[in-house]
Image (cartoon, rainbow, N blue to C red):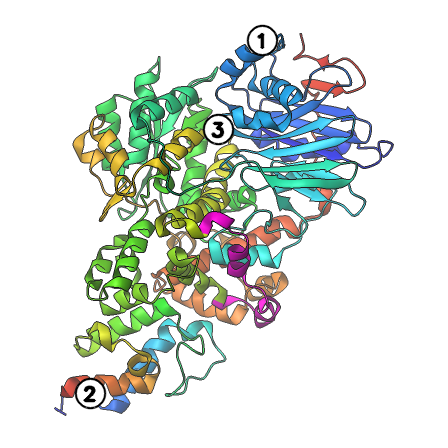
């Protein structure tokens, strides 16, 4: 797991300075605290910061197959690399290192992009072919690992794991992208290729971009989720998940797990514990506010499985204290504080000497665990039979404390939330709730956005097959593409874990598990109001019955209290002051003032105020950190010696080389 | 009308205060007329409508039926006051 980046220019005579690469390495060093490497070619330069997980001695990057040959900077893991290496070896292709990075590079050299289909893992990389001056950027199927890029007017392309790497390169300056910000307050995060920064793009999940001599010659998706009826049998779920966990324990360092106390992480923990050759270490967030806390369930699972269990106890003080850092790592406005406890959890995990954790991420999207899926099923049923609306009262039990009470108004809200003909039918209630933040925009921002509709853009970009899928399959696709990848795997996973050099691994996001989930009959995912049926049945043979039968409890954290309880940091009021709001120019100071009055009075208890407060505050913090920063001067260069230094015209040189 | 029941004017005032407290704090320049369209003017979103219905039920002790949740009954301050008065009589 690493941070990667590079700059490629159309003209091989145009220099890429080592200082630029060193600045980029400095900006991405948290992703790779163990060292860094540089690579220089005519009119091109590459860098890698490394978190050592495999082949600790000789796994430094960039890796080049031979002098003058192709080169790769690579972030991630291909879990089936030993099998692929053996296959290469049978074909007479020898690898110098034991890394998955070199296996990927040699497969690419042999098979081109067809090699991607063979990779089981989570990765983002830049593959440089010096002749014909071609750079290929690739991202894994589900978008677990991030990859950002920008293209200058002269055709220069810079890429980096995180946007801050691009700002450090000097190739693009940090400025707000209003459409990207508006997507945050529509969908919870900007959708690729858009980001919250103007001129900064992100490669989408399963994306490939090919740049050649100053032009993007191809931009496509090499994998995307496909649904729909199939004749193929689903296969054995237990065997698949066990294998996925087994592969994700492959590392030359110990692997731990995150344990939320729910079904998914408990199942992964149980299987990891069985497959580990050492006592598994588990890590959990506990909340001092009992409305959010799941410690009882966590302790029950840890005790039943005999893990070495660690907890991070989180309250308002800790959330406010880490919020600035989390926004800096997320690189986008947020609408919830939920990433913050996971940032603190990753820090504690690192302090315990664990740098790789497996988690239950992805199960709710694949096996229809969220209440959103129940809502879709109920809304469809209610459109056929409007007499059975009371069942809506069972949805979203955690909304009860937010002032939105059950009853006829609640039921009507779901019944009338949107037309079944709308491709976004499944998400209309969430979209309606999230849009509350937009009420705080300045009038001139409202005017600027008047002709823009992020939902129309989304509808226009849905795959052609989308209309042939069932309503629940459409919902699942939208969850993967509008929430899991842009938000949950980013701000709530990669960014907050890699902030501390901790790598998350997601056994449910093995593409074989996804394909299995698609083949399962619908009622083995959602049966009435019983979610994740197949997974639950599997868990009942492995976990204590009480855990296997638990209803989904969404992961949330307090949103308003951390910033207004006694002892809140001074920067909160400063960032929300009238001058600061005017300076940033996105939210209206008078509208926000009404919100702040409610927050200060302890009356901001609803969903609307929580999202609005976090949205406004994070935007202010984000702007201050990035957009008001003094250009590349904010990104000091790495001054240490690189572990490896590749000059593509010369033999590979460096400490990591044989 | 029994003496304990507020007048339509009092109901209007209560509804207005609920809306001002919960929704108009983010619209400082907006003066809310009794007949203004709450949804059409963007004063309330659809989830806000849920809160208004529940407020009417809990404050005025009225049981609102699914079919009664219409803009005709809840679309403006005046509409809500009329609905409360009518529901009490029935």
Q: Which residue does the image show at 25% across and 54% down from the upper left?
A: A397
- Both on one chain, marks 1 and 3? yes
Say what secondary structure mark 2 lies in: helix
Magenta span contains residue A464: yes
Q: Whole-Å distance between the Cαs marked 2 and 1? A: 84 Å
Residue A517 appears in the figure? yes
Q: Whole-Å distance between the Cαs marked 2 and 3? A: 62 Å
Magenta region, main secondary structure? helix
Q: Whole-Å distance between the Cαs marked 1 and 3? A: 29 Å
Residue wearing tag 1 = A89
Magenta span contains residue A194: no
Percent coordinates x, y for residue A567 in the rendering: 41, 51
Percent coordinates x, y for residue A515 in the rendering: 40, 33
Q: Outermost residue toward the front?
A: A231
Chain hosting mark 2: B
Q: Name the quadrant of the C terminus of chain A.
A: top right
Residue wearing tag 3 = A503
Disc on the earlier residue, 1 or 3:
1
Q: Quadrant of residue A299?
A: top left
Say what secondary structure mark 1 lies in: helix
Position of A572 with respect to A633 (left or right) is left
Label 2 Cα crowd, 10 Å radius (few <14 / some 14-19 / many 20+): few
Give the residues drawn in magenta, as a range. Answer: A439-466
The label number, if any, that marks residue A300 in the structure image: none
- When the figure is inspected, residue A568 is found, relative to residue A41, above or below; the finding is below
In front of the other: A425 or A355? A425
Position of A209 with respect to A153 (left or right) is left
Q: Quadrant of residue A547?
A: top left
Residue wearing tag 2 = B86
Chain hosting mark 3: A
Q: Which residue does the image show at 26% across and 42% down from the upper left?
A: A523
């Amino acid at each position: 797991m690493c941070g990667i980046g590079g700059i490629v220019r159309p003209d091989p005579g145009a220099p890429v300075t080592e200082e630029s690469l060193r600045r980029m390495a400095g900006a991405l060093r948290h992703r790779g605290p163990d060292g860094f490497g540089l690579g220089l070619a005519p009119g091109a330069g590459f860098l890698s910061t490394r978190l050592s997980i495999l082949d600790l001695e000789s796994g430094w990057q960039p890796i080049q197959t031979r002098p003058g040959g192709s080169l790769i900077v690579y972030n991630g893991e291909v879990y089936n690399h030993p099998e692929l290496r053996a296959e290469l070896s049978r074909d007479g292709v020898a690898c110098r290192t034991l890394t998955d990075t070199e296996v990927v590079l040699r497969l690419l050299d042999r098979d081109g992009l067809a090699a991607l289909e063979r990779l089981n893992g989570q990765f983002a990389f830049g593959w440089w072919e010096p002749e014909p001056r071609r750079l290929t950027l690739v991202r894994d199927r589900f978008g677990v690992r991030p990859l950002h890029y920008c293209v200058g007017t002269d055709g220069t392309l810079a890429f980096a794991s995180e946007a801050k790497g691009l700002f450090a390169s000097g190739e693009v300056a940090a400025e707000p992208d209003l459409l990207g910000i508006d997507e945050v307050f529509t969908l919870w995060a900007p959708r690729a290729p858009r980001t919250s920064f103007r001129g900064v793009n992100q490669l989408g999940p399963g994306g490939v971009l090919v740049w050649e001599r100053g032009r993007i010659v191809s931009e496509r998706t090499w994998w995307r989720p496909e649904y729909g009826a199939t004749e193929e049998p689903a296969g054995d779920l237990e065997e698949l998940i066990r294998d996925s966990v087994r592969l994700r324990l492959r590392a030359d360092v110990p692997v731990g797990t995150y344990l939320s106390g729910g079904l998914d992480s408990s199942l992964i923990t149980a299987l990891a514990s069985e497959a580990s050759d050492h006592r598994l270490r588990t890590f959990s967030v506990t909340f001092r506010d009992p409305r959010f806390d799941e410690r009882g369930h966590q302790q029950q699972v840890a005790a039943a499985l005999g893990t070495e269990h660690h907890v991070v106890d989180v309250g308002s003080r800790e959330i406010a204290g880490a919020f600035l850092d989390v926004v800096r790592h997320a690189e986008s406005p947020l609408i919830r504080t939920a990433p913050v406890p996971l940032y603190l959890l990753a820090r504690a995990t690192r302090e315990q000497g664990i740098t790789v954790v497996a988690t239950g991420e992805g199960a709710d999207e694949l096996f229809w665990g969220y209440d959103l899926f129940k809502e879709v099923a109920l809304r469809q049923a209610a459109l056929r039979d409007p007499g059975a609306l009371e069942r809506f009262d069972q949805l979203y039990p955690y909304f009860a404390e937010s002032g939105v009470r059950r009853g006829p108004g609640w039921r009507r809200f779901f019944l009338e939330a949107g037309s079944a003909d709308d491709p976004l039918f499944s998400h209309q209630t969430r979209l309606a709730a999230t849009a509350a933040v937009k009420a705080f925009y300045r009038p001139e921002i409202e005017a600027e956005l008047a002709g823009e509709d992020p939902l129309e853009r989304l509808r226009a970009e849905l795959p052609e097959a989308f209309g042939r899928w069932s309503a629940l399959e459409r919902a699942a696709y939208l969850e993967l593409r509008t929430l899991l990848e842009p938000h949950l795997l980013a701000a709530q996973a990669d960014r907050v874990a890699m902030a501390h050099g901790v790598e998350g691994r997601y056994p449910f996001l093995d593409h074989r598990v996804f394909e299995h989930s698609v083949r399962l009959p619908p009622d083995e995912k959602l049966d009435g109001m019983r979610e994740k049926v197949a997974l639950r049945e599997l868990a009942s043979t492995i976990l204590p019955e009480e855990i296997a039968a638990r209803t989904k409890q969404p992961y949330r954290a307090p949103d308003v209290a951390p910033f207004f309880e006694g002892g809140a940091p001074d920067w909160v009021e400063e960032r929300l002051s009238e001058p600061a709001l005017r300076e940033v120019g996105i939210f209206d100071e008078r509208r926000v003032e009404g919100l702040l009055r409610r927050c200060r009075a302890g009356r901001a208890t609803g969903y609307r105020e929580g999202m609005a407060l976090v949205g406004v505050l994070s935007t202010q913090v984000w702007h201050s950190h990035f957009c008001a920063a003094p250009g590349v001067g904010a990104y000091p260069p790495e001054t240490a010696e690189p572990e490896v230094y590749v000059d593509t015209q010369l033999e590979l040189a460096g400490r990591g080389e044989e | 009308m029994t003496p304990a029941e507020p007048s339509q004017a009092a109901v209007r005032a209560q509804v207005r205060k609920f809306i001002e407290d919960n929704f108009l704090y983010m619209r400082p320049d907006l003066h809310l007329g009794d007949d203004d369209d709450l949804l059409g003017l963007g004063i309330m979103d659809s989830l806000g409508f849920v809160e208004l219905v529940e407020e009417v039920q809990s404050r005025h002790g009225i049981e609102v039926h699914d079919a009664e949740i219409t803009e005709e009954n809840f679309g403006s301050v005046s509409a809500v006051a009329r609905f409360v008065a009518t529901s009490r009589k029935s």
